[in-house]
């Protein structure tokens, strides 16, 4: 559906539900979930999807609100992303009644109560933003990666396409091309039609595994122990992963410190060489010469009786190192 058609359809469903409750005091509860403009700039510069972050955070906030205050009920809401301001933000529209007809209560009498529901809203929203940012930038598994439902639906669609491959009509060499086109065709179906295909395929898979599942009921305790052990292993692996991430961060920090120390030492060494090369004196120039060729040239110059007096006079009249510089320039011109 186009965006305008989707908005119109949501509005109609919302109004129809409102009419079922008769006289209502609240048409909706509205909140804005906004991000700092600097945070938006950082996300855009890194090529991250801000809309995905806002949708993820909105769902997390509403899921936490429902589980904490309406655990045996359902809360209805709509989310709309706006890009008309420098800070990209999401509008949350909460339906005033739960699925069981209980009037929704979002705020308390004291709006600024640190333990109130609105304060809980803000705290959970900030937590979801921080968690999303950490996962997106620091973790191997990104927060914007497809969720379990999306991955499983894609696999189910691929399974349906593979099951319907016409071996007698399509050559084996064209199998992958046919499967790709069939998968795109299935994904373009209407939701209701695609859902029927997915349910049918899932029922077929359940029937396939039903006998083995019935025969293994006696091993339910063993399976439970295996699941518990698997869960513990996952927790241990997660803890090890977090420790490794900490070690990597510490190593990176140490590497940055070493690089900074090396740059400082290199700068100090360069300054030392510069000032040593421009110091005054007689016998230091030959020792400070950078190459053997320069040292030999200076030695021969000082040892030549015809030029010794002139060379010593020249060395005492100019800063130490200029002769070496002139010599290097002269050698460059000769090459």
Image (cartoon, grey):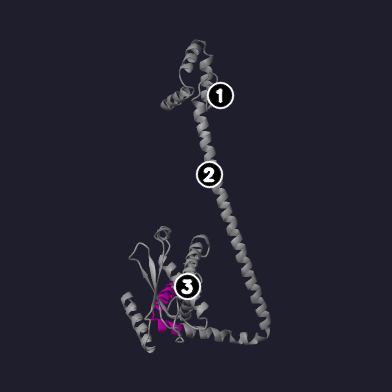
Decide which of tag 2 and tag 1 comes sooner along the chain: 2
- Answer left or right for 49 relative to 239: left
State the residue position of label 1.
Answer: 287
Q: Residue 261 colored magenta?
A: no
Task: Determine which quarter of the picture holds residue 210.
Answer: bottom right
At x 39% / y 60%, what residue is drawn? 37
**Residue 155 is at least partly visible in this image:** no
Instruction: Magenta stretch: give its range.
Output: 176-197
Q: Is residue 335 above or below residue 254?
A: above
Within 10 angstroms of label 1, few (less than 14), some, or many (20 or more) residues?
A: few
State the residue position of label 3.
Answer: 61
Question: Circle 1 — which element?
Answer: helix
- Answer left or right for 203 relative to 233: left
**Badges 3 and 2: C-beta atoms under 8 Å apart?**
no
Considering every residue shown, the one lying at the far front of the view is 110
Decide which of tag 3 and tag 1 comes sooner along the chain: 3
């Amino acid at each position: 559906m186009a965006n305008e058609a989707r908005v119109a359809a949501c509005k109609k469903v919302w109004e129809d539900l409102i009419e079922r409750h008769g006289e209502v005091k609240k048409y909706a509860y509205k909140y804005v979930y906004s991000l700092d403009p600097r945070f938006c700039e950082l996300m855009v510069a890194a090529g991250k999807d801000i809309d995905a972050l806002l949708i993820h955070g909105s769902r997390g906030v509403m899921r936490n609100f429902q589980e904490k205050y309406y655990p045996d009920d359902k809360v209805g809401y709509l989310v709309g992303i706006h890009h008309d301001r420098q800070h990209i933000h999401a509008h949350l529209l909460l339906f005033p009644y739960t699925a069981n007809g209980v009037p929704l209560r979002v705020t308390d009498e004291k709006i600024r109560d640190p333990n109130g529901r609105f304060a809980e809203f803000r705290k959970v929203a900030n937590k979801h933003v921080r968690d999303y940012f950490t996962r997106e930038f620091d973790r191997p598994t990104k927060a914007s990666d497809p969720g379990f439902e999306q991955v499983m639906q894609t696999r189910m669609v691929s399974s349906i396409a593979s099951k319907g491959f016409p071996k007698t009509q399509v050559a084996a060499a064209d199998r992958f091309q046919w499967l790709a086109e069939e998968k795109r065709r299935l994904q373009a179906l209407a939701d209701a039609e695609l859902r029927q295909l997915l349910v049918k395929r899932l029922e077929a898979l359940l029937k396939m595994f039903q006998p083995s599942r019935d025969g293994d009921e006696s091993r339910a305790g063993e399976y439970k122990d295996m699941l518990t052990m698997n869960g513990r292993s996952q927790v241990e692996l997660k803890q090890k992963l977090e420790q490794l991430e900490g070690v990597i961060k510490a190593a990176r920090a140490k590497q940055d410190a070493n690089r900074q120390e090396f740059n400082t030492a290199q700068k100090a060494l360069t300054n030392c060489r510069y000032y040593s090369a421009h110091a005054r004196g007689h016998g230091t120039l030959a020792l400070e010469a950078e190459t053997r060729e320069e040292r030999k040239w200076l030695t021969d110059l000082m040892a030549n009786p015809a030029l010794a007096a002139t060379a010593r006079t020249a060395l005492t009249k100019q800063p130490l190192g200029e002769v070496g510089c002139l010599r290097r320039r002269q050698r460059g011109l000769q090459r």
